[in-house]
Image (spheres, rainbow, N blue to C red):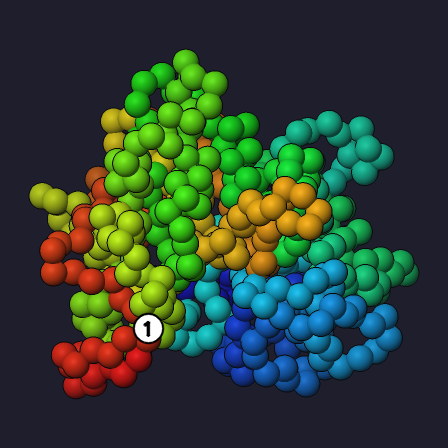
Amino acid sequence: MLLGVNDFGGGATTTSSSIDWIVISNFMVDADFLLDEVPELVSCPKILFFYEHGTPRPWLNAEFIRITPKEQPSVISASSNNNPTANPLRYQHRYGSHHTKMFLIGFKDRLRVIIHTANLLAVDIHKKTQGAYIQDFPFKSEEEKAGSSSLKNSCCFEDTLISYMESYGYNRTHDWSNSSSHEQEKITLQHQLSRYDYAKAKVVLIPSIPGYYNVPDKCMSQGYLKLKSAIAQNATAKIGPSGKLVCQFSSIGSLSEKWLREFSSSLMIPDAKCSSTDGKSKEKLEDLLQLVYPTAEEIRLSIEGYLGGNSVPGKKKNVEKSFLKPLYCKWSSSDKGSVRNPIHKKENVPHIKSYYQLTNDGSAMEWFVMGSHNLSKAAWGEIINGRYGKCLKVQSWELSVLATQNLAGGRLVPFKQNNHHGRNGDVIIPLPYSLHPERYSSIDEPWAVDLSYKEKDKFGRCFAG
């Protein structure tokens, strides 16, 4: 998917020796697989792993820190403590997780940011459908370091990235440069990240950090309310009816119809003639929203057979709610009347998570989101009335990116055979499924990981959930 020394090192002309440090943030990490896949990692001077599940390995250059909101609150010791486990929050969140998938790669002359959707496991990398945003950022000029830069987008991306990393409670200082030409001061990771210029960021970071955020003061920086705010600021309001919202995910939480309606209406670009999207609350959900989620048959017919369904952990009680059934669309649907799109990965189980709103005419996307957020309250947050009043409750660490036509500088259109280079300023989004997904038929059922399936897959296996 994205592993290989060229992806880490920036191309055939760049060697791994030009990398000073790497930060790896993920849910599940198989360190042995990662080292087999990218053996050049052993030559990287410093690697930090933030993860929830996995087995640390005694690499001389690596530090493993297990982050989980499920444990009692604790901090990462400033002393040398091998493979600590920490919950740097004020509370436990029993249904939360450290679910972000990210690489930060420090080269001698720039920072590479990769926000992606894959666990660092062999089956995720080689057999699942995944997605990644990759962008490089140079060091700030001396003028920018002095604080004279007032670039709005730079500050937004930088502030969000640094505040997200601060949430881990990792404050150890390091010499982040591998240069021996002069002495380098030891600084925190957050300080190191502040040295780069994010002015040309093509996306907005959408974080979720576990916690309780007061409404309305603190809540707009997290989860779906951060996404709502970012869409309002970076997408152009339209006159007339809005296009549908499409949500594609690999897991679904215990949703209520009320929450799903609030979530979907919050993300719709408002009519320029109206002050809000409140009118959407009166429409039927199926007229506003499509949910792309694999059927049991699509899992059975995948290249992994039923085993691929273990990465789509939707449970019966969550996927079979009556208000969801009219919203479901197939993962494997293709654009009708066209040659099969080579990036439509219908036989590869989806682990990507993506969201977008169609334009009025359905030919493009107003905005597009990709990252670690599944469709759940734990990931996106929910408004509750708690002991401290009305607040947004978030339970998981997540990180996604938002692209809009304004940020990208052109219409967001999916890859097709006849437009893979883009035309008339179009910006290509390599969408691995149909822009207009096909509704479930009357015999289709959403995959549930805790159900049993008797019909055999291509390997002759049944499935006992």
What residue do we see at 53% from left, 79% from top? 30
Q: Is residue 73 above or below residue 453?
A: above
**Disc 1 target residue:** 449
Quarter of the rendering containing residue 374: bottom left
Instruction: Tell me if 461 is positioned left or right of 63 in this view.
Output: left
Q: Is residue 71 above or below residue 445?
A: below
User: Dot 1, crowdedness within 10 Å: few (<14), some or many (≥20)?
Assistant: many
Q: Nearer the viewer, residue 104 or 463?
A: 463
Q: Is residue 248 above or below residue 18?
A: above
Residue 416 visible at all = no
Q: Is residue 246 above or below residue 464?
A: above
Q: Position of residue 90 (x, y in %)?
A: 74, 60
Q: Position of residue 307 (x, y in %)?
A: 30, 78
Quarter that holds the C terminus: bottom left
Instruction: Tell me if 323 is positioned left or right of 5 in this view.
Output: left
Please give the count of numbered marks on the rendered protein: 1
